[in-house]
Structure formats: structure tokens, C-alpha cells
Image: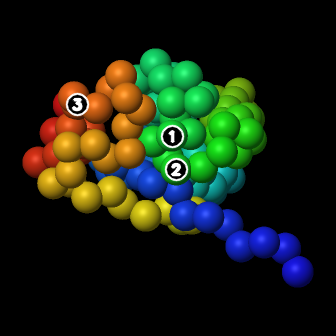
Amino acid sequence: MPRPNKPRNICGLPRTNRFGPNSSQESMLETIPLTIDEYECIRLIDFEGYTQEEAATQMTVARTTVQRIYEEARKKIADALVNGKQLIISGGSYVLCDPNSNRCGRPQRLRQHRCWQEKGELK
């Protein structure tokens, strides 16, 4: 019996959950599921500039887990871009952090920042 997934610490849900070609036949497009934890990993590493180790600390998982999540997410995003598929962000094993927390699981050098989706705004 495999070990159950450990929930990842996520600081906020994406503002939109659907990306893809702008087509009149959207219902005909093939979709690719991107989980919330994969989205968070891409956000932390590519958008926020975290190292994999810092992202792992914030998400409360091992660095190797972040590396695996990151590789899977990038493959899915590349497939959607290259093949014109629709990307749907939903699901996954995650828990939302406390927006009233000053830390939100951030690494030491980033603890002065607050949760990125506090009051519905990017910080």
C-alpha cells in the first residue's frame, strides 16, 4: 500500500483556473489538469524566484518532492502551449495557509512578507 500524499502548504488559490486558446469551439479543446500544488510550485519558483529548497520549506515538503512537482507542472504547461490545449487548474493535495499569519511557511529570508493573496491582492 503506497504512502498517502502529504498536503502541501498553499498561500492562495489562483485568480483564474482556466487557460488556453481563445476559440469558439472551447468545448472541443483537449484539457490538461494542473493541480493547485503544481500551480503553487510554478508560482514560487518561476514567478517569485524562490529556489527549490525555499519553495519546499514554504510548501512544507521535501526538496525532491518540489523538484518532481515542478517537472510535472512544466511538462503540462509546455504541452498546453505547444499543442494548443486548455489548462485547467484544480485539485491536488493541499491546505491553505492562514492569511492572518506573518509567516505562511516562508523561508527565513522571506519571512517579512505576508501571504501573497491577502485581501485578494498579490503582494
Tell me the residue at 51%/40% (across/down). Answer: 57
Find residue 110 and report its horizontal and vertical position in percent.
33, 26
Residue that carries the numbered disc 1 in the rendered image: 57
Amino acid type at mark 3 = His
**Which residue is nearer to you in this view: 22 or 105?**
105
- Disc 3 or 2, which lies upstream in sequence? 2
Do labels 3 and 2 touch, CB within 8 Å? no
Q: Quadrant of residue 91?
A: bottom right
- Local crowd at mark 2 within 10 Å, few (<14), some, or many (≥20)? some
Tag 3 secondary structure? loop
Amino acid type at mark 1 = Thr
- Point out the image quarter for the N terminus: bottom right
Tell me the residue at 66%/37% (across/down). Answer: 63
Considering every residue shown, the one lying at the far left of the view is 119
Tell me the residue at 36%/60% (across/down). Answer: 96
- Local crowd at mark 1 within 10 Å, few (<14), some, or many (≥20)? some
**What label sits on residue 60 in the rendered view?**
2
Find residue 27 and report its horizontal and vertical position in percent.
55, 59
Q: Quadrant of residue 2?
A: bottom right
Tell me the residue at 78%/72% (across/down). Answer: 3
Find residue 43 and report its horizontal and vertical position in percent.
46, 33
- Point out the image quarter for the C terminus: top left
Do labels 2 and 1 touch, CB within 8 Å? yes
The answer to whether any part of residue 91 appears in the image is: yes
CA separation in Å, label 3 and label 2? 17 Å
- Disc 3 or 1, which lies upstream in sequence? 1
Considering every residue shown, the one lying at the far top of the view is 49
Residue that carries the numbered disc 3 in the rendered image: 113
